[in-house]
Amino acid sequence: MVGALFQNVTILIFIYVLYHFIFRLLKGKPWAISIISGIFLGGTAILAMLTPFQVEEGVFYDARSIVIGIAGFFGGPLTGTIAAALALAFRISLGGAGVVPGSLSIIFSMLLSTIAAKLRPRYQPLVEKHKFFTIIGTWFLGFLIHVCVVLSQFLLPEGRWREAIPLMLFPFLVIFPIVFSLICLLFLDNERLAQAGKDLAESEARYRSLFQNHHTVMLILDPVTGVILDANPAAEAFYGWDRATLSTMHIQEINTLAPEEVEAEMARARLRNKSIFYFRHRRANAEPIDVEVYSGPISIHGRELLLSIIHDNSQRVRAEKELKALTETLEQQVKKRTEELEAKTQRLTELNREHESFVYSVSHDLRAPLRAIAGFSTILGDMLRESPPNATGQQGSVPNRGSEVYHLLERIQANAERMQKLINDMLMLSRVGTRAMNPQPIDLSLMAQEIIGEETEDKKERHFDCAVQENLHAYADPDLARILLANLISNAIKFTQKQDIARIEIGSELREGKEVFYIRDNGAGFDVEAAGDRLFAPFQRFHDSDEFEGTGIGLSIVRRVAMRHGGSVTVESAPGKGTSFYFDFGEAE
Amino acid sequence: MELNDPHVTILIVEDNPDDAELAVIALKQKGIKTPYRIARNADEALEIALGRRLPVSGRPTARSATAPATTPTLVLLDLKLPGKSGLEVLKELRAAPSTRYVPIVVLTTSVLEEDMIQSYEHGANSFIRKPVDFSTFLHEIELVCHYWLDTNLQPKKSPV
């Protein structure tokens, strides 16, 4: 019995080898494979039946269940059916007492293995995860097949199973499942190899197609020597050399860098997995062209090669160059403008200085004759007082109109004084515009109180009702702010002189979302519309000088102070309705 | 030494004849009868105060000889002079031993603070901004001149 089994196993190994030979022979023809393997495996089953372990005439046992099982499990329904049909025909032709169980064994093997083949994909993930499951699974299939074989022995006529079953129990339920499992493992391994080969072939084909048909320029290089091993049609078109010519060339001939540098770059590409390079490449009939090269190692047939993908970068390089040139031009323009501005600023500063010194000289030089006029007229007045004209009639040269002479002398002095004020205000206006600023937080309320105190000191005969809001804080140059405030306050005091009670209000309020300070009076007021733009211009007056004295420079000073801080001054007024000035010091801080 | 002592003099350094005259009248009106000398420019002032040789400036004149110095008792000094400025005069008077302690009143039309600061820095005793109004001028002249003349004369009154 052992001898017979040994024979069977030998047959199985033989079929395994032969099977693969056929498989390779008919590669790529699935139908032919199915039919041929079916016939072949059926023949093997017959061969197994010819070397059986004979119990008696017509009752014999062999490895046909294993062969059919393999056929069904690996070949699929078609192979299984063909193999089973052949084996069945042969078994029936042999006849004997065991014909029914023998036939049934074949059918069961076929059915169970085919079902198992159908179920196989479902367990594939499990199998891939646990190798052990393959062994258990195939062993279980073998065991199941052979349990059926053993059970079919009960159909032996005249209760012959009593002798047969004990004999076959051990080989069929212990040895055969293991053998089945082992053969399955062999087949599976082969299948895996075949699959791997197929994958490889597919990937190679895919790669080939990718390389050949892609519109991107690609070269395959020897990373050490720089020999061009392969070039795709896109590369042929790009470089203008055909593949044969390119294959005789080195990349060093194409790259405009020195050969040593190219080799160094290739070494870099080999070491790092992928690198981007910016080169200039030569072409068959054109100027060198700027390219962007993606280079990385690639393994082909066990050789480490370099795949270079080349992009035409000339447009980008040109665009970059243009951009750079543009930026440079722009920078130069900015520089030029800045220089011009600086020169202008300097010129302005000079002009300012010149202007200030001019105003200063003018005021100085104007003051001297003024002083003489005022001084001498005063002295003249004094002299006349000491010896009144025509008092005795002896000083006939002096007109006998004493009071008129004094009056005229007074007019001279008053005018001198007025001119003096004008000069002072002019000087003030000039200096307010040019002096250095030192902005800091100031208490406007306190400042206003002080100024009101000073301005009303010599006007005790008048009645004032002044209201200064508390905690008016501003960020401004204190001296300039004081000048502004003093001008507006003295204005208010001046234009309220006709009121029984002069009301002056100083505070802050929101106007157009901005906090502004105001100074409001119940004075004479004026027609804002008529004043228009001239209101803040120097030497503009809107009242008769007999009525309200003044130089007409005060508001110019006020506006200049506000403007120097980045602020502004506005006014609301109407004749007889009083005046409100609004001012701020800009967004300083 | 009295105010009327012939050795007591006031030196008025003033280029503007009107201003000089106003100053003279002011002194007179305020009863300061001290003799005065008027210098029209810096060189004249230094010549009078220090007896310094005038630089020979092409004009063949006897003034190139050394004139005797008249150390003033009080100097009224205008800052804005033709050529060398009043400030230069101030410096030179302070550098000379004979005039180091002579009271010097700077009289000027300048409104620049800097002029005042520099004047005091270089040893001016008082600084008067010439007012347009003559009465104010009178008042200031009286105040300052009396003060400095009295002060300057005081030590010499004490018996040494």
Image (tube, rainbow, N blue to C red):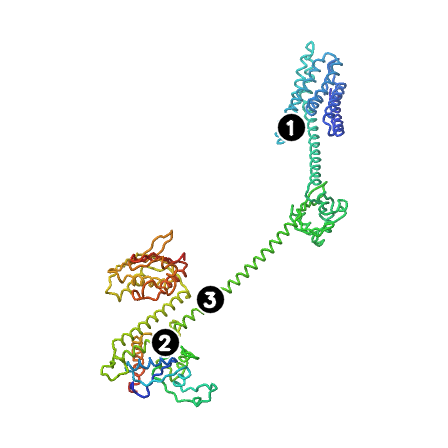
Residue A416 is situated, as x and y percent measured from the top left of the image, at 33, 73
**Where's the N terminus of chain A, which quadrant?**
top right
Considering depth in this image, is A1 or A235 the residue closer to the camera?
Answer: A235
Question: Which element is circle 1 on?
Answer: helix
The residue that label 3 is drawn on is A349
Residue B138 is situated, as x and y percent measured from the top left of the image, at 30, 77
User: Are discs 1 and 2 located on one and the same chain?
Assistant: yes
Question: Which element is circle 2 on?
Answer: helix
Looking at numbered disc 2 in the image, what kind of residue is underneath it? Pro
Residue at image position (41%, 85%) is: B47
Chain ID at mark 2 = A
The residue that label 1 is drawn on is A134
The residue that label 2 is drawn on is A369
**Where's the C terminus of chain A, which quadrant?**
bottom left
Give the Cα distance between marks 2 and 3.
31 Å
User: Are discs 2 and 3 located on one and the same chain?
Assistant: yes
Question: Which element is circle 3 on?
Answer: helix
Looking at numbered disc 1 in the image, what kind of residue is underneath it? Thr
